[in-house]
Amino acid sequence: MKVTRADLLAKLRASDAPMLTPAQVAPVLGCNPQDIRVAARQAPELLGFPVIVAGRRVKIPRRPFVRFMREGRREDSTL
């Protein structure tokens, strides 16, 4: 059985983890995790969802990411 993007998003939605990694969200977006890491450092405003860059690490707040995927827009608050 093939896992769909909707299935992956549902799994993230059900998670209780406050933060996600680029490796977790990349399959939902259909891209390479490294592309998310690079965009988070170079132009985070273009991603459409908030990211936190701390040194070499990139974290994505789960709730805003799920909201972005559901509604297709960024929430007003920035991190």
Image (cartoon, rainbow, N blue to C red):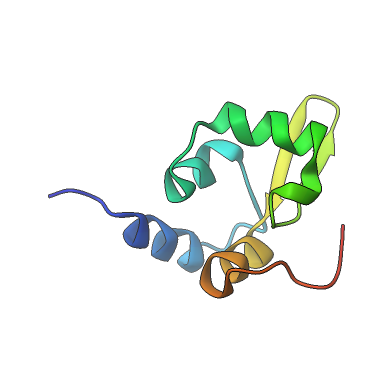
Give the residue at x 83% y 73%.
76
Q: Residue furthest left?
A: 1
Q: In this view, does 53 lie to the left or right of 72?
A: right
Which residue does the image show at 32% across and 60% down from the upper left? Answer: 7
Q: Residue 36, how many percent across, how many down?
A: 63, 36
Question: Quick one: 7 or 47, which is closer to the camera?
Answer: 47
Total count of labels? 0
The x, y position of residue 63, in whole percent, is 64, 67
Q: Check the image and report above or below for 36 versus 78.
A: above
Q: Which quadrant of the figure has residue 21?
A: top right
Indicate the position of residue 56 as horizontal and vertical percent values.
78, 24
Q: Which residue is drawn at 60% across and 30% down?
A: 35
Location of residue 35 with respect to 5 vertically, above or below: above
Q: In this view, does 26 lie to the left or right of 40?
A: left
Q: Where is residue 27 in the image (x, y as percent from the top left)?
A: 43, 43
The residue drawn where x is 35% and y is 62% is: 6
Outermost residue on the front side: it is: 46
Q: In which quarter of the image is the C terminus?
A: bottom right
